[in-house]
Amino acid sequence: MTSRRGLLVGAATAALPAPALLGGAGAAWGHTRPAGGDGGSTMAGEGDAHSGHGGHAGFPSGSVPPSRVGFDPTQILRDFDRGRTSTLADGRTLREWDVMATEREIEIAPGVLFPAWTYNGRIPGPTFWAREGDLMRVHFTNATGHPHTIHFHGVHTAEMDGMPGVGRGNIMPGESFTYEFTAEPFGTHLYHCHTPPLAVHISKGLYGAFVVEPKAGRAAADDELVMVMNGYNSNGGDDNEFYSVNGLPFHFMDHPVQVKKGALVRIHLINILEFDPINSFHIHANFFDWYPTGTRLTPSEYTDTVMLAQGQRGMLELRFPYEGKYMFHAHKTEFSELGWVGFFEVTA
């Protein structure tokens, strides 16, 4: 059974593509298919026009084209879902969403298929956006063959906690349930399935971001982004073989995040990495203001690196004073070399 260290050693010594390294890894967790066709180049040295990064950590074919996956990590960056809105009798805003748990294969690396469990067909699931005090209704349908829930990090009643054995508890296959609660506190939050075994339900893809804007608002940002850090245990072992931001390893190497020189960039950063005790975020040639959990209006520190355990999250703000390409990545080298790495491309 191939470990992530085995992947790195194999990549360094033989420069083999990911399918050859993984071989016939367990079908219950992931398997491979020949790369190519259906939306993108997969040969060594080929790729997107932005790229020129063939051979990432020994993976000659780079990242998977979003057209082969069905979602785009670049679009997820700015895809804040404000729901369907209406006004309640008391004057509050009601926001409603429809969420469906599904099972589908996702090509996480060229030729590597991962049997995912998803919210609305993507990893991470939709980014819910609300203003502090809004009433949220999330209409959840379980279209898989396993029980699932949605557990929101925030303040709400026990009945809405998405916890098996409490309130409605598990939503069984074919069933539906509506989670209803007030959006509080303001900050950068997350949601995920809370059905045991948690490591499986989370690592297979059932998670997403949940942003609550302060009632009085924040100082306006020129560009606001969401980055969800995750990993993929593709062979059923006890560690991950691939790492990413917003679902696809190496995506932001081939498709750098486009930002403007001098613009205030606000990033909601969430760590939902399973099987590894800690993750991190590091920016090259710059520093940022860090707001832990996003629940305060003033930053706690000015830094270029933060460390996050699973479930930890925060908000960072920075400006790029110079044009050019600037790397961001986990400051755990294994994670970077297995997909958690990318570039900001700064233009005038």
Image (spheres, rainbow, N blue to C red):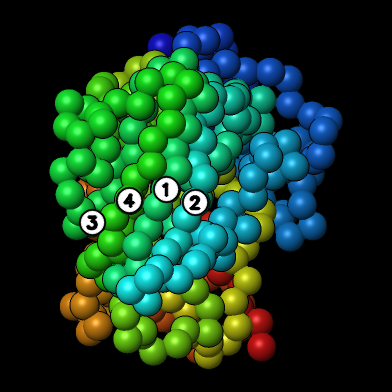
| Element at label 3 | loop
Q: Secondary structure at mark 1?
A: strand
How far is disc 2 from disc 4 in space, using C-alphas?
11 Å
Q: State yes or no: discs 2 and 3 in contact (Cβ < 8 Å).
A: no
Q: Which mark is residue 180?
A: 4
Query: Which numbered circle lies on residue 138?
Result: 1
Spot occupied by residue 48 in the image (x, y as percentages of width and height): 77, 52
> Is 252 on the left-hand or right-hand side of 281?
right
Residue at mark 1 to residue at mark 4: CA–CA distance:
7 Å
In the picture of the structure, the residue carrying the numbered disc 3 is: 154
**Label 1 environment density (alpha carbons within 10 Å; few <14, some 14–19, many ≥20):** some
Is residue 164 toward the left or the right of residue 261 in the image?
left
> Is 62 located above or below residue 135 in the figure?
above
N-terminal-most mark, 3 or 1: 1
Tell me the residue at 25%/23% (across/down).
Answer: 196
Q: Earlier in the sequence, mark 3 or mark 4?
A: 3
Q: Residues within 10 Å of mark 3 (few under 14, many from 20)?
A: many
Question: Residue 272, position in %: x, y?
Answer: 33, 45
Disc 2 residue crowd, few under 14, some 14–19, many 20+, Cα 10 Å? some
Identify the amino acid type marked 1. Val
Q: Between marks 3 and 4, how big is the CA–CA gap?
A: 12 Å
Label pair 1/4, CB-CB below 8 angstroms: yes
Q: Which quarter of the rendered picture does the N terminus lie within?
A: top left
Point 80% across, 40% down: residue: 40
Q: Is residue 297 visible?
A: yes
Q: Is residue 174 left or right of residue 261?
A: left
Pointer 2 with pointer 1, Cβ within 8 A = yes
* Residue at the image point whose x is 31% and y is 78% from the top: 214
Which mark lies nearer to you, 3 or 4? 4
Point out the tag, 2 or 1, that comes first from the N-terminus: 2
The amino acid beneath tag 3 is Gly
The answer to whether residue 58 of the structure is visible from this angle is no
